[in-house]
Image (tube, coloured by chain):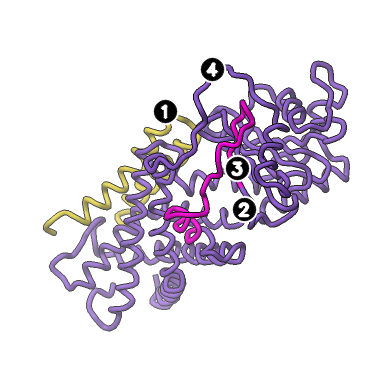
Chain colours: A purple, B yellow
Amino acid sequence: MTAAAMRRWGWIHKWSSLICTLFMLLLCVTGLPLIFSHEIDHLAGDGIHAPEMPAGTPRASLDAVAQAAVAHYPGLVPLYFFAEEDDPNQWYVKLDTRVDTDESASRLVLVDARTAEVLGEPQFDSGFMSVMYRLHVDMYAGLPGKLFLGAMGLLLVIAIVSGVVLYAPFMRKLDFGTVRRQRATRTRWLDLHNLLGIVTVVWALVVGFTGVVNTWAELIFKAWQAEQVAALQAGATHTVLAADAAGGAAADGSVQRAMERALLAAPGMKVGMIAFPGTLRSTPTHHAVLLSGDTPLTARLTQALLVDADNGEVLEASGRPWYVTVLQLSEPLHFGDYGALPLKVLWAVLDLITIVVLGSGFYLWWRRGGQEAKP
Amino acid sequence: MMRIWAWPSVLALLTAGGLVAGLVSDGLGDVAAWIGLGIPVATGLWYSLRRGD
């Protein structure tokens, strides 16, 4: 590498890292407990539990579940049902003043799927973990905060790429893994920075970039909704279950029937979410039912079916565009929650190593100057 | 060139393979993910913490 090229890459590496380092440290520190949020919630025991009932206890209709939620928060309207991951007998119901708000003041209620009784209000918005979550996701600044952190994440990606380019000239005379312990402190930290940076580079790139994609989630869902509505208007849809298909009960405007018809159209799938018409995740005239399969990949890559609220026709309109696929793959790859506890522990160790890389990088800049260990 | 990039490339491929394996398969895939991510982590810690040089 010529001296001029090296100066250029060095400039890119220095400024992209310096600008994002403070925020990346914040993300690493707050992200550490978030890796284990599932375990921490369980340990803390502040989860809400549904009472034991014999297996096969029939389930209440979704409409009764929605009614119970509305009775709990009079004046609000239901937006979504979310299946509780660990307990199929519970529904989260999200409510807000209108179906088309930005959901910043929305409410969640947990309802027993069998008795349609309200079990409680999950406290996702208070306590230590919620502070960690908000600092990590948007620094309490909503969408602008998310997009800002996303921009910092892009700078991190640039810092990592330029760091990889600089790795070669710095390692020209050194064997892999060399840490010159007898030399000046700065030299030792330079070697550690290069070593730890290069062994974690793929993980850091993946977690960094998928984090950026996650900051775009709202924009991605808006774009998807627009695409679905456009497909509907253009008639570019694919009917999965005709309105008058034999075998299914006819539509009656209820959300329960909408779900039944979606499941009839996609046998063997599991309901992950149901959106009422008019919300961000549906269209003005359809219920949306998000279904997932039972393989690790299809559990992440959901299928979105639209159920006509009037005639019950089940259709797919722009089922899952590529950018939604990217988003849905970005979630597990960022959270590290797809390989049981050992993967989470590795995620945590990699997170701690990243803190060392960030800290040593800052130190190397701080103690810059004409010392030794120039390549 | 070879000398500089040999080990980093191996570790990068292990990491990438581990990240994908865990995503496409449960059970064996998870084990592959632990190994694929575990080896780079162990390598980094080994060289950072060992005495001597």
Q: Residue at x 33, y 76 (%)?
A: A365
Which quadrant does the C terminus of chain A fall into? Answer: bottom left
Report the amino acid beneath label 4.
Ala
Q: Chain of mark 1?
A: B
Which label's residue is closer to the chain start, 3 or 2? 3
Disc 4 crowd, CA 10 A, few/some/many (<14, 14-19, 20+): few
Report the chain holding disc 4.
A
Provide the secondary structure element on which disc 2 rests. helix
Q: Label 3 to label 1, Cα distance in Å?
A: 34 Å
User: Is label 3 on the same chain as label 4?
Assistant: yes
Q: Which residue is mark 4?
A: A55
Question: As displayed, is residue B35 above or below residue A125?
Answer: above
Which amino acid lies under the numbered mark 2 shown in the image of this protein?
Ala
Residue at the image position 56 percent from the left and 53 percent from the top: A214
Q: Within the magenta stretch, is there residue A112?
A: yes
Q: Which residue is disc 2 drawn over?
A: A217
The answer to whether marks 2 and 4 sit on the same chain is yes
Q: Circle 1 sits in a helix, a strand or a loop, which is it?
A: loop
Q: CA distance from mark 1 to mark 4?
A: 27 Å
Q: Chain of mark 2?
A: A
For marks 3 and 4, the one nearer the N-term is: 4
**Are discs 2 and 1 both within one chain?**
no
**Label 2 – label 4 distance at C-alpha:** 37 Å
Q: Which residue is mark 3?
A: A109
Residue A313 found in image quarter: top right
The region drawn magenta spans A108-136
Query: On the image, numbered disc 1 is attached to which residue?
Result: B27
Under mark 1, the amino acid is Gly
| Residue A3 sits inside the magenta stretch | no
